[in-house]
Image (spheres, rainbow, N blue to C red):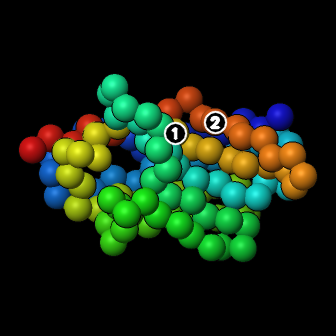
Amino acid sequence: QVQLVESGGGSVQAGGSLRLACTASGDIFNINSMGWYRQAPGKTRDLAAVITNGGITNYADSVKGRFTISRDNAKSTVYLQMNSLKPGDTAVYYCNAKKGSSHVRDYWGQGTRVTVSS
């Protein structure tokens, strides 16, 4: 089992910045990637950013150029630096870890709320 604990959510005005952190613990061997998904009220949970073990990153078009994902392997922690925040970024942000090779399993954090006011 993998446990994911998120921190760093909150409320900010448009144009502001926040940094989210997610620390993995437990059976973290063979985690392939970690990322952040977000879910706005009444909408689906969608990928915001992901980073692989090899450091390859991928971003949703809506956050490219504003969000940066990074990881500290020594701390088993992934970060999401969010700049130039918009009201449309308001959502619950969930940390995700994908583990395994032939059979990939998803693990989720409890979610952290980000609210951006205009």
Q: Splitting the image into 4 quarters, where does residue 41 fall?
A: top left
Residue 118 in view, yes or no: yes
Q: Splitting the image into 4 quarters, where does residue 106 fall?
A: top right
- Residue 32 x/y as whole percent: 76, 58
Amino acid on which disc 2 is placed: Trp
Q: Quadrant of the N terminus?
A: top right
Q: CA distance from mark 1 to mark 2?
A: 7 Å
- Neighbours of disc 1 within 10 Å: few (<14), some (14-19), many (20+): many
- Residue 27 x/y as whole percent: 86, 43
Front residue of 85/102: it is 102
- Neighbours of disc 2 within 10 Å: few (<14), some (14-19), many (20+): some
**Which residue, as the protein is rendered here, is positioned at the far left?**
118
Does residue 106 sit above or below 75 in this rendering? above
Front residue of 110/50: it is 50
Mark seen at residue 108? 2
Residue 113 in view, yes or no: no
